[in-house]
Image: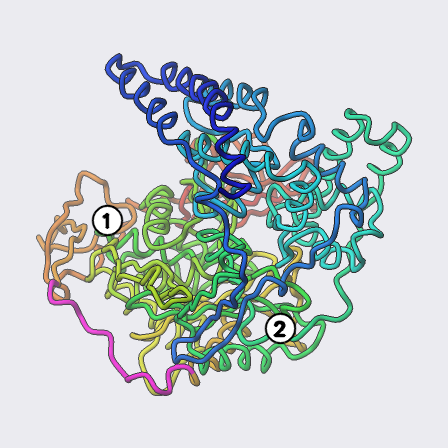
């Protein structure tokens, strides 16, 4: 009998007692959270099942031999290999500064040297939190349990269930019988992930501070310890404020535990986080951001040990030719070192296969993937979701809105929503259709469309189509005003839904994985969901074609095939976008600065807009990427029935498109074959259009009363000297008085001070 088995047998009785204790605590929680008495018996049987069949760590032991895993492109080209030494360098506990081990203990497991693999106090605390919330929110994992998760149970890493926790506890207890506390801590510090592709403290020390771990100071030690909980959000490269706050929490814990004294604490919390990337990096290989994206998917599912040592063969969707075209297109437009960064994602809209991915300028310089991880404001890109929400509700794209001026809406539970066109642009007409407002990306007109269909409808459509970021229902979302931004991958997925006639395919990077023996571990199975009606997707495509043919995206036009798309530019040009598609390829391009939202004034002397640099990159990429793809036209779906809001002209009896003033009780929803529906809007009559009173040359208070009584509540008074009228008298207004002006317009009144 092996030493491992003998120890396992000797400790089995003690282990059973401990697990009974934990199971009873767990059972208490379950009973408290459930109100049905019949469930008590089921809960009891769960405990009996665990006691009767406790897991053995021997069953979970990772393989000792390391085999290289390989990643292949769609054409069979080998594009990357993973092996254990590639992303980590092991160091002994003696090489690791005491401040770093203490920092990790202080924030991750302060009772590490006191517990027996699991922490009953921590479990009780977690149970109380879970009872209070009614759900499982707290996992109470010790460092030993985290080692179990990293090396023995990676597949359940992100699953917090009582089943998993009890197995984890059992294995953690056994692990401490075979390894000393120091050995377990050393394993943990050499295994845990710190972001930026760094596994273990030595790799993390080099990535963040460009030095060996033994030379880290106290502030740097606390920073690294703070990253462990959430390597992306807490990275000092991309959220310095959050990283700083977390570092100081680590230091506060170290002070409380007497790992440092008051003087060290006060001196260190004032220090800024000073990072330094390595001066030299090894070759980054082909499509490094895509490879890293695939690697993270694999690690989340299979764990670090299996990915780097398991001898997997991973077959992906990447097309090498398209990847080369993507990188080349970006370099043609953004060729200076001081230029902003760009991200590009391309996918097949018919299945979600990712064909190309560029996540930044230089993977050796920055491993944060701007294509998948960056969340940026999308600007007018989101008008597409307002358009589709309108079509789905039956709003005709031929309905017109006034595109001029600043307009203001009062929003319940929020500040008034004030909308202007980019650069204060005005038009020589007061009537613009939704089609034209889309093509020319007119904010003022689209704000009125959004208010008509509702912010929640726009948010739901966006999420249904592939935007994963949770969206609130505020109207500003339709113009790209999000609390949290979106990634290019999300936008590319959503636009692919339109290109495939309303059918959503989630992004796919991995087609198949086999183990060292050739056994298939997983294989992609086609999945899709119809989230918008095919005919309305087709109608949206027709309108989005106009963006490229005559609107804000003409620089993206391809000469040999149909294309549709949408530009996006944020208010201060910190983020500029172009996303478009053919029948068989969708691509999203984003340009901006990676670390911060910084205004892009110009690029090589040319103003910056979504329809300029991103559209140019998109065109350069697509010209190469679609060379070997069939030239196809968008085709009208067989089921061409649409729902349309209509009204009847009382004078002629003609069924027409309602105008924006038509009363809701005069609007009906009717069915038509697409192409046979009414497209002419009922005329706007003088009675429907409010007239702005002329309030010049009168006392300001009197002018204010007249405007409010007429329904104009959004008034801005501007002091402007004018000697021809008394003090506090008005002398001009914008828009002029005695003209047709809607009550949502912002009225500017100029007053002699």
Q: Where 386 sits versus 115, above or below?
A: below
Q: Which residue is drawn at 43% across and 39% down?
A: 159
Label 1, secondary structure: give it. helix
Residue 610, position in %: x, y? 51, 68
Front label number (2 vs 1) = 2
Near-viewer residue (345 or 449): 345
Residue 221, position in %: x, y? 77, 44
Tell me: 458 left or right of 500: right
Label 2, secondary structure: give it. loop
Residue 42, position in %: x, y? 27, 21
Give the mark nearest the N terminus, 2 or 1: 2
Bounds of the magenta segment: 625-639
Q: What main secondary structure does the magenta stretch of the protein show?
A: loop
The answer to whether one can see residue 408 in this image is yes
Tell me: 36 left or right of 276: left
Name the residue that disc number 1 marks: 393
């Amino acid at each position: 009998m092996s030493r491992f088995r003998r120890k396992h047998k000797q400790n089995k009785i003690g282990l059973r007692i401990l697990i009974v204790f934990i199971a009873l605590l767990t059972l208490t929680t379950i009973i408290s959270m459930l109100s049905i008495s019949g469930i008590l018996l089921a809960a009891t049987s769960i405990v009996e099942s665990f006691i009767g069949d406790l897991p053995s760590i021997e069953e979970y032991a990772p393989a000792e031999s390391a085999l290289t895993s390989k990643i292949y492109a769609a054409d069979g080209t080998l594009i990357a290999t993973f092996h254990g030494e590639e992303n980590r360098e092991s160091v002994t506990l003696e090489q690791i500064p005491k401040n770093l081990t203490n920092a990790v203990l202080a924030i991750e497991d302060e009772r590490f040297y006191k517990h027996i693999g699991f922490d009953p106090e921590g479990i009780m605390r977690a149970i109380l939190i879970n009872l209070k919330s009614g759900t499982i929110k707290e996992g109470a994992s010790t460092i030993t349990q985290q080692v179990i998760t990293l090396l023995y149970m990676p597949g359940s890493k992100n699953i917090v269930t009582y089943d998993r926790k009890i197995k984890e506890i059992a294995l953690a207890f056994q692990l401490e019988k075979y390894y000393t506390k120091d050995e377990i801590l050393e394993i943990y510090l050499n295994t845990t992930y710190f972001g930026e592709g760094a596994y273990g403290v030595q790799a993390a020390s080099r990535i963040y501070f460009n030095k060996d771990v033994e030379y880290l100071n106290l502030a740097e030690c606390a920073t690294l310890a703070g990253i462990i909980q959430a390597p992306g959000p807490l990275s000092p490269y991309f959220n310095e404020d959050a990283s700083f706050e977390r570092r100081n929490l680590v230091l506060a814990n170290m002070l409380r535990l007497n790992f440092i004294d008051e003087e060290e604490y006060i001196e260190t919390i004032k220090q800024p986080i000073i990072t330094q990337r390595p001066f030299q990096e090894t070759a980054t290989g082909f499509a490094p951001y895509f490879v890293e994206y695939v690697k993270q998917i694999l690690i989340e599912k299979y764990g670090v040990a299996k990915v780097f040592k398991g001898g997997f063969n991973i077959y992906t969707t990447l097309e090498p030719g398209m990847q080369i075209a993507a990188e080349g297109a970006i370099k043609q437009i953004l060729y200076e070192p001081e230029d902003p960064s760009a991200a590009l994602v391309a996918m097949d809209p018919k299945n979600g296969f990712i064909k190309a991915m560029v996540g930044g300028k230089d993977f050796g310089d920055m491993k944060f993937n701007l294509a998948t991880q960056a969340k940026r404001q999308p600007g007018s890109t989101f008008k597409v979701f307002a358009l589709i929400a309108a079509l789905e509700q039956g709003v005709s794209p031929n309905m017109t809105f006034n595109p001029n001026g600043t307009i203001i809406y009062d929003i319940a539970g929020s500040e008034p929503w004030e909308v202007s066109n980019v650069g204060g642009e005005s038009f020589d007409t007061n009537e613009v259709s939704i089609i034209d407002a889309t093509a020319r990306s007119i904010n003022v007109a689209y704000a009125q469309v959004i208010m008509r269909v509702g912010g929640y409808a726009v948010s739901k459509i966006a999420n249904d189509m592939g935007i994963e970021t949770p969206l609130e229902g505020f109207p500003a979302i339709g113009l790209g005003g999000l609390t949290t931004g979106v990634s290019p991958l999300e936008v590319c997925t959503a636009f692919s839904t339109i290109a495939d006639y309303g059918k959503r395919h989630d992004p796919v990077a991995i087609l198949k994985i086999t183990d060292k023996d050739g056994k298939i571990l997983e294989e992609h199975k086609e999945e899709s969901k119809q989230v918008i009606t095919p005919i309305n997707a087709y109608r949206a495509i027709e309108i989005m074609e106009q963006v490229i043919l005559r609107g804000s995206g003409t620089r993206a036009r391809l000469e040999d095939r149909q294309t549709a798309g949408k530009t996006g530019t944020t208010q201060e040009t910190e983020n500029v976008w172009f996303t478009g598609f053919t029948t068989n390829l969708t691509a999203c391009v984003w340009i901006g600065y990676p670390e911060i939202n910084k205004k892009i004034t110009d690029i090589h002397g040319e103003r910056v807009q979504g329809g300029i640099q991103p559209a140019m990159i998109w065109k350069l990429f697509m010209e190469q990427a679609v060379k070997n793809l069939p030239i196809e036209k968008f085709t009208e779906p067989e089921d061409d029935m649409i729902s349309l809001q209509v009204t009847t002209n009382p004078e002629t009896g003609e069924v027409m498109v309602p105008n924006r003033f038509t009363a809701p009780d005069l609007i009906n929803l009717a069915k038509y074959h697409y192409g046979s529906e009414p497209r002419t809007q009922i005329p706007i009559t003088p009675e429907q259009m409010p007239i702005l009173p002329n309030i010049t040359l009168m006392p300001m208070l009197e002018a204010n009363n007249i405007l409010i009584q007429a329904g104009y509540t959004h008034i801005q008074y501007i002091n402007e000297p004018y000697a021809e009228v008394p003090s506090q008298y008005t002398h001009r207004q914008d828009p002029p008085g005695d003209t047709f002006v809607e009550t949502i317009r912002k009225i500017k009144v100029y007053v002699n001070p």
